[in-house]
Amino acid sequence: MVERQVSTLDTRVRFPPPAFVPSEAVSMFSILKTAEQAQARELRAKGWSIGEIEHELGVSRASVSVWVRKVELGPEASARLLKRAGLGAFVSGQRKAAEFRAKRQAYQEAGRELARAGDVTYAAGCMLYWAEGSKSRNAAHLTNADPSLCAYFVNFLRQYFNVPDAKFGVACNLFADHVARQREIEDYWLESLGLPRSSLRKSTVNRYSKYSEKKRTNKLPNGTCRVSVCSTEIVQTLYGSIQEYGGFDRPECLD
């Protein structure tokens, strides 16, 4: 038989009292925070940015933002803040520009290595781009009226740069007498290049002037075609190869 026990003051479970924080420590913490808030407001009134105050005081950005939200800025403080913000954007922009330029430089060096490999077919593609390609910094564009030439360039990009069909853009440059045949001409170029209609971009139609309208008819029965691939790596690699083949340096290709 279990004997029933009666809870007494001696047997009752006792819990430890809550932790005691000396009032002196609380007061000191409050004083420090108040001093930081006052200093943050003083710096803000001088035109310091929230980021500058954050680093100066070693507190969180969220705290600084709350402390200084009602600080009114005078003309000098506002001018300093605007100048600082502009300088930050400028420095950031300069850093990014340097990073992108270094990438373009690396792509050109890779292009020089490809040129040194002595692949004749690759060299032919580079020479074609040197003669007919546009000098864009971040995309390879080639425009011509010869479908065989354009098809060669498309196959060149496929073979040496593994460019899929989805990355190609095709735009037709037409004349006034082509308007009735626009769909037919667009299909002609797509078939010649072996590309789907999803590669087609908006065609351009050039209107004849009164002086030339009787002289241009049937000069280019299918207009011209522009083949484009938006790739900094590809076009800068081509520039590097071309410079290696030509034995010259052209820094402006980087910029």
Image (cartoon, rainbow, N blue to C red):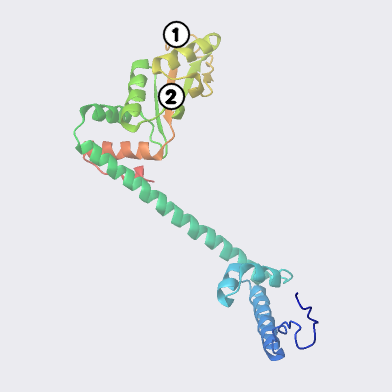
Amino acid carrying label 2: it is Arg
Q: Of tags 2 and 1, which is closer to the observer?
A: 2
Q: Is residue 45 above or below residue 239?
A: below
* Residue at which label 1 appears: 218
Asked if one can make out residue 177 in the rendered structure from this viewpoint, the answer is no
User: Considering depth in this image, is 171 or 169 the residue closer to the camera?
Assistant: 169
Q: Amino acid at mark 1?
A: Asn
Give the mark count. Answer: 2
Residue at figure coordinates x 68%, y 69% from the top left: 75
Q: Which mark is residue 226?
A: 2
Q: Secondary structure at mark 1?
A: loop
Residue 84 percent across, percent down from the top left = 57, 65
How far across and down, in percent of the image, does residue 183 sit? 53, 12
The quarter holding residue 253 reads top left
Mark 2 falls on what kind of element? strand
- Rendering quarter of residue 7: bottom right
Q: Give the x, y percent position of residue 95.
A: 44, 57
Q: Is residue 57 visible?
A: yes
In three-dimensional space, the C-alpha distance between marks 2 and 1, rounded to whole angstroms, equals 19 Å
Disc sitting over residue 83 in the figure: none
Q: Residue at x 56, y 76 (%)?
A: 56
The one nearer the camera, 224 or 14, is: 14
Q: Is the N terminus in the top left, top right, bottom left or bottom right quadrant?
A: bottom right
Question: What crowding class fits label 1: few (fewer than 14 Cα within 10 Å), some (14-19), or many (20 or more)?
Answer: few
Name the residue rendered at 56%, 60% in the picture: 86
Out of 218 and 13, give the one closest to the viewer: 13
The residue under the point 44% across, 30% down is 167
